[in-house]
Image (cartoon, rainbow, N blue to C red):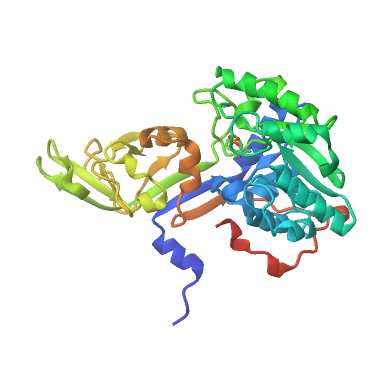
């Protein structure tokens, strides 16, 4: 017997379909750039491009004009470095950790330096190599998460010597409340950032994430680094934008049944059918990124009709109340919508008591993934890929 192809196996085993529209991603990049024409638009592709697949997202963004990329982790940067031409610059938000210096320099990855200790280590690496090294410097303007503290800035103000072997591409900071346009923290952090950035003289500034972009031009600076808005989610809840949804999720019906009033449903038997009901069990659960907090709260959709989740979300399945559908309208193998035209990522996140970021980055690996509009990069001579040792690269780094 012939071995089954991967495609055959996927076709008969998939529990659901995750559709990822790379054309929409491209549209979103171009839309955001047009909303901030004076700034350069970078792309945040950490956590596997928020779960959608950095190997598909980054090349499409490159073709749309993106040359600055941010990841969180060093190994994400290594994987990205191998995907993109040399003129795409890759920055590591989490900073330069001890022992990464040599490889970071070798692979032309650019660290975001988050402390004087990191500046010193990168400067020493430059000295050892006898050439200048590039980096960004992050300032803590009021989030207390990453970046130079006010005290460290004072130290640096008295002498910029620790930077003498470095090319600082830009100074950056991160807003804590950019998704709340009226929050006074935004203006406060803006003031702090302006003052702090002046320590570095006339270097470029990078201040805003998706939310910051929508706070107005004064927040745009030289470079903007959006994440979530590229993936089709408005950074401010309820704000109408021209962004297109990138992700749609449908899950398969694996069983239907009629139950009598009084029947208990799901783990904990904590839902009791108030009347006779028709139920459908779908093949996706919390192991697929549908939070348990959707138990008795969320819903799926079929032909525009809302099908409430009844009982607890299980690891691999969810039970829906499909009583509003006609008899036999929903068949085994039909797909119900979890994210799509009837229910946005935000709607699902609201029902789960979380944010779209968490749903998106948690969407599981068990779905069949369908990519629309993928692109490959056509390299010109000047944009040759870096000659990196393959052994240092892992295609699975994002997973
Ligand atoms: C994740 C992240 C971003 C992107 O934020 P969005 O809200 O997704 O646009 C930008 N900057 C930093 C420092 C981040 O950690």
Residue 76 can be seen in this image: yes
**At x 19% / y 47%, what residue is drawn?**
268
Left or right placement of residue 154 versus residue 246 in this view: right
Picture quarter containing residue 201?
Answer: top right
Q: Position of residue 338 (x, y in %)?
A: 40, 41
Can you name the residue that lies furthest to the bottom here?
1
Picture quarter containing residue 172?
Answer: top right
Residue 81 to residue 187: above or below? below
Q: Position of residue 163 (x, y in %)?
A: 83, 43
Residue 32 to residue 9: above or below? above
Left or right placement of residue 206 versus residue 329 in this view: right
Picture quarter containing residue 153?
Answer: top right
391 or 138: nearer the viewer:
138
Residue 40 can be seen in this image: no
Quadrant of the picture in which ligand 1 is shown: top right
Left or right placement of residue 148 versus residue 204 in this view: left
Point out the image quarter for the N terminus: bottom left
**At x 40% / y 52%, what residue is drawn?**
288
């Amino acid at each position: 017997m012939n071995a089954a192809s991967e495609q055959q196996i996927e076709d008969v085993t998939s529990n659901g379909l995750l559709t990822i529209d790379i054309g929409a991603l491209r549209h979103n990049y171009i839309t955001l750039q047009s909303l901030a024409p004076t700034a350069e638009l970078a792309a945040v592709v950490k956590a596997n491009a928020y779960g959608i697949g950095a190997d598909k997202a980054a090349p499409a963004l490159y073709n749309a004009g993106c040359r600055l990329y941010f990841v969180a982790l060093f190994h994400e940067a290594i994987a990205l470095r191998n995907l993109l031409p040399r003129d795409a610059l890759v920055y590591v938000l989490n900073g330069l950790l001890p022992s990464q210096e040599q490889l970071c320099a070798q692979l032309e990855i650019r660290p975001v330096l988050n402390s004087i200790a990191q500046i010193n280590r990168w400067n020493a690496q430059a000295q050892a190599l006898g050439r200048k090294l590039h980096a960004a410097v992050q300032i803590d303007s009021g989030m207390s998460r990453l970046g130079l503290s006010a005290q460290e800035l004072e130290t640096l103000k008295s002498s910029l010597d620790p930077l003498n072997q470095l090319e600082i591409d830009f100074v950056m900071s991160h807003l804590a409340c950019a998704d709340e346009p009226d929050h006074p923290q935004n203006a406060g952090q803006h003031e702090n950032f302006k003052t702090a950035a002046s320590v570095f003289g006339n270097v470029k500034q990078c201040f805003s994430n998706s939310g910051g972009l929508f706070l107005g031009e004064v927040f745009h600076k030289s470079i903007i680094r959006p994440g979530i808005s590229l993936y089709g989610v408005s950074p401010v809840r309820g704000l109408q934008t021209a962004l297109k949804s990138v992700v749609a999720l449908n899950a398969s019906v694996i069983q239907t049944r009629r139950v009598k009033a009084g029947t208990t449903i799901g783990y904990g038997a904590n839902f009791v059918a108030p009347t006779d009901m028709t139920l459908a069990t779908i093949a996706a659960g919390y192991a697929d990124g549908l939070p348990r907090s959707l138990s008795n709260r969320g819903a799926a959709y079929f032909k525009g009709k809302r099908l409430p989740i009844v009982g607890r979300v299980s690891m691999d399945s969810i039970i829906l109340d499909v009583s509003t559908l006609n008899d036999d309208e929903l068949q085994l193998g039909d797909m119900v919508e979890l994210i799509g035209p009837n229910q946005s990522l935000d709607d699902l996140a609201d029902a789960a008591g979380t944010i779209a970021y968490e749903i998106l980055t948690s969407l599981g690996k068990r779905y069949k993934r369908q990519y629309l509009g993928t692109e490959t990069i056509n390299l010109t001579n000047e944009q040759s890929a870096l000659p990196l040792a393959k052994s240092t690269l892992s295609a699975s780094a994002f997973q």
